[in-house]
Image (cartoon, coloured by chain):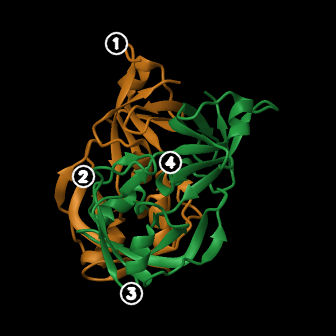
Chain colours: A green, B orange
Amino acid sequence: MTNQDSKLVPIGISARHIHLSQAHIDILFGEGYQLTVFKDLTQPGQYAANETVGVFGPKGGFEKVRILGPARKESQLEVAMTDTLKLGIQAPVRESGNIEGTPGVRVVGPKGEVEMDKGVIVAARHIHFHTSDAAKWGIADKQVLKVKLNGLRPLTFDDVIARVSDSFALDMHIDTDEGNAAGVKTGQMAEIIG
Amino acid sequence: MTNQDSKLVPIGISARHIHLSQAHIDILFGEGYQLTVFKDLTQPGQYAANETVGVFGPKGGFEKVRILGPARKESQLEVAMTDTLKLGIQAPVRESGNIEGTPGVRVVGPKGEVEMDKGVIVAARHIHFHTSDAAKWGIADKQVLKVKLNGLRPLTFDDVIARVSDSFALDMHIDTDEGNAAGVKTGQMAEIIG
C-alpha cells in the first residue's frame, strides 16, 4: 500500500569495497598517489575509484576489491557476511567509522602491502537522509526505522539506522546478502513503515 | 513479544547443496553406487551424504558441493543468489521440485560428468510443518506466512511458504544470504506473526 505520503527511499546495494587512508594509499600505490574517479556515487563527493586492491584473510581473499574515494582518516573494508567465510574473518556488524576492536586484513596493491590491524566490518543497514528529507518526514539522526522492501522476496528490515546530514542524499544502503535476501536491485524503492 | 501461544519455529540455514537422481549418481560415482550417510537432517529420512560433487557454470564453480540424499526423481542444485554470480547462472527463486525452465549446470564426480539441462534454483523460503503442527496453529499447506527473525539483524520475511505433510518435521528453511541478512544461525527460533 503506497500513497502520496509514503516515505519512499531508493535502494543502493553495496558490493564489498574498501576505503583507504592516504597513508595506506601511499604504501599500496606509491607516495602521493591520487585515486582516479571511475564513477560518482549517490552520496555527494563520494566515488568509486578506478583502482582496486587485493584483500586476504587467513582462509582466502578477493583479488579485486573496489576502492571508494576520497581517502578517509582510517582504512575500512566493508564486506557481506558471506564474504567473511571466504576470508576466514569474523567481522562484526558495525556502523561505518566505528571500527575499534574490529579485525584486520592484508591489503595488496601494485606498489606494496598493508597489514590493516582493524577495520573489517559488515556495514549496518542504514538510510542516508538529507536534513530536509528527515525534517519533512519527522525522522531524527540515529533513529531506528522499519523499512519494507517489496522486491521478488518481500521482507521488512526492523533495524535500519537513520543518518541525517546536510551532505547526504536520500539513499538506503544494504549489502549483497541483504539485497539477495530481498530479491531487489539498486534503484528499486523501499518504504519506511515505522 | 513472545508468549505461550507464540508460533515458534526452529531455523535451518541451507548452504548450497545438490539432490541427484540415481541415473546421475550412476554416471558421477559409478553404476549402482549408493550414497553414504554423513549426517541425518531434520526432515525424516533426509541426510547429508559423505559424497560431494563439483558444479560449474559458464563463469566459475564450486569444487565441493554436498549431496543431500536419498536420490530423487530429478537432480536439483540449490544455491544462494550470491552463488549464482560466481557460477554465472541466473537461477530463479522456486519451490523445491518445480524446476521446469530453470537453467542447468555441469556436475563433476569422481567417475564421470553430467550436464544437467535444468534444475538450478534459489529455494523459496519455506517452513516444513508436520500435519499436527499445522492443525494446532491453523496453518494450511501453501499458505504464505509472515515470519519474524529476531537475530542480530532483525527482520520479517513476508513471503514464507507453508509446506504441510505427515512426513515433515517443524523447521524453517532459508538460504545463506537470508541467514546472513538476518544475522541468525541454525537452531535459533523464528516466530510466525501473520
Q: Are marks 2 and 1 on the same chain?
A: yes
Indicate which disc, 2 or 1, sits on the residue closer to the N terminus.
1
Depth check, front residue: A73 or A16: A73
Quote the CA–CA distance across marks 2 and 1.
32 Å
Q: Is residue A150 above or below residue A31?
A: above
Numbered mark located on residue B4 in the image: 1
Query: Mark 2 and 3 residues: CB-CB less than 8 Å, in contact?
Result: no
Quote the CA–CA distance across marks 3 and 1.
62 Å
Which image quarter holds the N terminus of chain B?
A: top left
Indicate the secondary structure of the residue bearing disc 4. Answer: loop
Give residue A54's position: percent from left, percent from top: 39, 77
Query: Mark 4 and 1 residues: CB-CB less than 8 Å, in contact?
Result: no
Is residue B56 in view? no
Numbered mark located on residue A111 in the image: 3
Identify which amino acid the numbered label 4 is placed on.
Ala
Q: Is residue A165 left or right of residue A19?
A: right
Indicate the secondary structure of the residue bearing disc 3. Answer: loop
Q: Which tag is nearer the camera, tag 4 or tag 3?
A: 3
Quote the CA–CA distance across marks 4 and 3.
46 Å
Q: Is residue A51 above or below residue B156?
A: below
Q: Is residue A161 above or below residue A49?
A: above
Q: Chain of mark 4?
A: B
Look at 69% across and 39% down and name the residue there: A131
Numbered mark located on residue B47 in the image: 2
Give residue A32's position: percent from left, percent from top: 48, 81
